[in-house]
Image (spheres, rainbow, N blue to C red):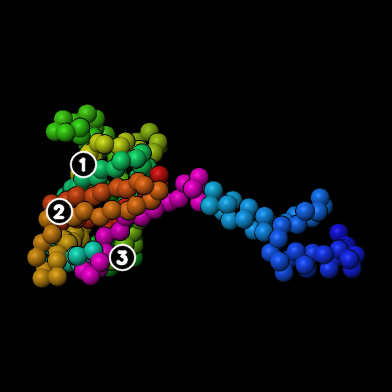
Amino acid sequence: MILTMEEVLELLSYICDNRPMESPWLCSIRETRDSSISNLYDVNVTNVHSRHFVFKSNPVVLGYRILRLPEYHKRSSFMIDTNQEVQINTFAVQSRSVRETAYQLTCTITVDALMGNVCKKTCVIIMTGTAIGNRLNSFPIRLNNGGPLILKPFYNYKFTLEFSSPHPVYRLVDSHFRDVTLARIKHAIQSSRIRVQHKTSLHVRKIGYSL
C-alpha cells in the first residue's frame, strides 16, 4: 500500500501523540504492539515446554554440592511427587570410565506408584542405549509398550534403578561436606512443580520432563 503525503503526515501525528489510528485500512500501531505481546504470552502459556530437573553443585543457592564417590554401584533409588500430571522423558547418568569410546548401557527401572504407604501400581522400564565413556549420557524413558511414562498428581513414585554393571554414583553434601540425606528442589512452572527426594547415593544427574 502506498500512502499519500497527507496520509503520511496524519500517520506521523498519531505516532507522535501515541494515539490509536482510526483509519479502516491501517491498523493502530499501539493495538498491533499490544496484540503481539498478548499473542506471545498466550503461546508461552499454552505450549508444553520440555524442562529439566538437574542436580548440580550450587551451595550458595541450593545449599548443597555434588560429591562423586570413588566406588561404582549397581543400584540406587529416589522418589518423585508432583501436583500436576508430568511426563518423564529422559534420565541422564554418568557413564563408566572405560578405554573404549562407547559401550551398551542397560538399566532396569522399577517404578512403584504409592498412595500413602500402599503400592497402587508397579511398572518395569528397560533403559538402554549406547553410552560414551566417562561423560554424562541421556537416555529416553518409555514404557515397555512404547508409551510415555506419565506421573499423576498426589502420588509418590519410587524409582529403583538396577544397572547390569556398576556405574558411577554421587551424593549431595552441604557446605561442610556433610551428607544431605533428603534433597528437595522445586521447579515452579505455571503453578506446578516436581519434587525429588532420596536417601541413597544417586546415578541420575538430570531428569527431563514435560507438563
Residue at position x 40%, y 44% in the image: 211
At horizontal 38% and vertical 51% (from top left) the residue drawn is: 189
- Residue type for callout 2: Leu
Q: Are marks 1 and 2 in contact (CB under 8 Å)?
A: no
Could you tell me if residue 67 is visible in this image?
yes
Q: Residues within 10 Å of mark 3 (few under 14, many from 20)?
A: few
Q: Is residue 15 left or right of residue 181?
A: right
| Residue kind at label 3, given as amino acid type | Arg
Residue annotated with mark 1? 158
The span shown in magenta is: 43-61
Tell me the residue that label 2 is attached to.
182
Is 37 left or right of 119, judged from the image as shown? right
Alpha carbon separation for disc pair 2 and 3:
26 Å
Please tell me whether mark 1 or mark 3 is closer to you in this view. 1
Question: What secondary structure is marked by label 1?
Answer: strand
Q: Which residue is mark 3?
A: 135
Distance of label 1 from label 2 (alpha carbons): 14 Å
Q: Nearer the viewer, residue 34 or 120?
A: 34
